[in-house]
Image (spheres, rainbow, N blue to C red):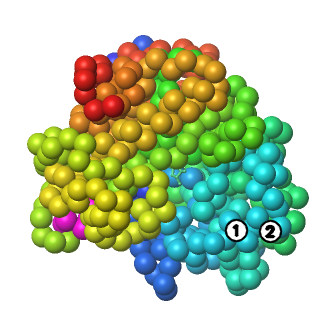
Amino acid sequence: RDYAHILAVDIGASSGRVMLGRWDGSHIALEEVHRFANGMLERDGHLVWDVNRLWREIQTGVRRYATWENQALLVSIGIDTWAVDYALLDERGALIGDPYAYRDPRNEGIAELVDAIIPPEELYERTGLQRLPFNTLYQLYAERDGSRLAAAATLLLMPDLFHFWLTGTRVAEYTNATTTMVLDARQRAWAIDLLERLGLPTHILPPLIMPGSRLGPLLPEVQNAVGLHRPIEVIAVGTHDTASAVAGIPGLDAHSAYISSGTWSLVGVERTEPLISAEARQLNVTNEGGVYGAIRLLKNVSGLWLLQECQRRWNEEGRRLTWDDIIAQAEAAPPLRSLIDPDAPEFLAVGDMPARIRDYCRRTGQSVPETVGEIARCCLESLALRYQQVIEALERLTGQPITTVRIVGGGSQNTLLCQLTADACRRTVVAGPTESTALGNILVQAITMGYFPDLTTARQVAAASAPQRVYTPREGAAQ
Ligand code: ADP
Ligand code: LRH
């Protein structure tokens, strides 16, 4: 029998969902209440997010819960989304334009302009953040002379925007703030001087809050709109989806690496302090903030984005390929014919991905993959080999042996990728939960509500609550 209900809103770059966590005193069972597509739109020559539609989808999910379930059991709700992107609000709290999407080409060449003002070594030393062309700091510099920034009173990252619409509070949750490149990694406070040196406004940064904080009840108008009879509490979780994904990994210990596998593959380990050194900077690894003081030392690897863009292209050509179709065809294709660097800059942007992959293979003198199966196999083998490189680099950097690779997220359902990862890494892979992000989101709320004393206990509950599958490396397989 259910004792309490907790709602998690988890929105990734490719899809969003509202998940119900049913707590019965010993398990948390996850149930999908509402799922919706997400994606970038082109408006006025820019790639943007339709946050108004996402806001409607969030409300649809909660309304659906309120109609279907015994809402007397609902205790709280928490939101996580992808990182780095931001909304600008004017003094009245109105949204200024559509938030830009991180793949918008306006960021090209901006990091190099910033380098001339703040040396990259210094920026890494302060923020511990990997250099990605779309870090929030670079995105802000890209619009330094624009009218949006001039009119802005507040900058809110995506989950913070939804928090504002849910409760009226304007705050910045710490885990997501660590992806901005405007946060001092050691002091865990805004590095306002970095904005000052770039001539960017500093008054737009809201106060920082830590994951697990209570943000207050739903605004009465929102509560009414979604059909709830009581003022439900909103809790700031690890609002960076990767922070929640890592929080929701059962069995994550010092000997495990994780791969949070979705649009991106976030490959890393969990630590207690930032690791900022010349070697870390050369490897371009990031120190993102986790829940309860943890540091996520990880690297962004271009993940299933490669296949998402291929699938989009193939579907435009009239083929209707499900993930199962694509994986089956990849499985049937010959192994190790051609490999790409998944992180090559040309794969970052929206476009004809199969053509770009073919071009890459042609240019590098490899056999050119033509069929769906050959292209998908090339992507999956290339990802698995990249995971191996990153995991071994992390092992060398930290001096901590890694024996197990834990894959979570939508990509943990890709049985071929999981097996190839076990083969390439020569380590056991434990796959699942698929919805570790929603689970991690719910576990933090449950800790705030007093159901668990700490994350270790909460993760043990996660282990008992979510299915996992083990892959062992095959002898003589692709390495
Ligand atoms: P994000 O949070 O970045 O939007 P998800 O964690 O939802 O990403 O993962 C989405 C990815 O999961 C898809 O791009 C796809 O490659 C993979 N995926 C989703 N469903 C399946 C499935 N049934 N089988 C295999 N892979 C799947
Ligand atoms: C994954 C993710 C990742 C960020 C990227 C922008 O959804 O949050 O951790 O680097 O999106």
Picture coordinates of residue 359, whole percent (x, y): 32, 67
Locate residue 274: give its quadrant: top right
Q: Secondary structure at mark 1?
A: helix
**Which quarter of the figure is the C terminus placed in?**
top left
Q: Main secondary structure of the magenta part?
A: helix
Above or below for 350 versus 264: below
Please name whichever residue, 266 or 86, is drawn nearer the observer in this view of the structure: 266
| Mark 1 neighbour class, 10 Å CA radius: few under 14, some 14 to 19, many 20 or more | some
Please name whichever residue, 308 or 34, is drawn nearer the observer in this view of the structure: 308
Q: Is residue 162 left or right of residue 479?
A: right
| Mark 2 neighbour class, 10 Å CA radius: few under 14, some 14 to 19, many 20 or more | few
- Residue placed at 73% from the left, 71% from the top? 113
Picture coordinates of residue 197, whole percent (x, y): 87, 66
Please name whichever residue, 399 or 155, is drawn nearer the observer in this view of the structure: 399
**Residue 327 part of the magenta-drawn span:** no
Rounded to the nearest angstrom, the CA distance separating label 2 from label 1 is 7 Å
Q: Which residue is mark 2?
A: 116
Above or below for 232 versus 423: below
Q: Which residue is mark 1?
A: 112
Can residue 337 be seen here?
yes
Instruction: Write down the region rendered in magenta.
Output: 308-315
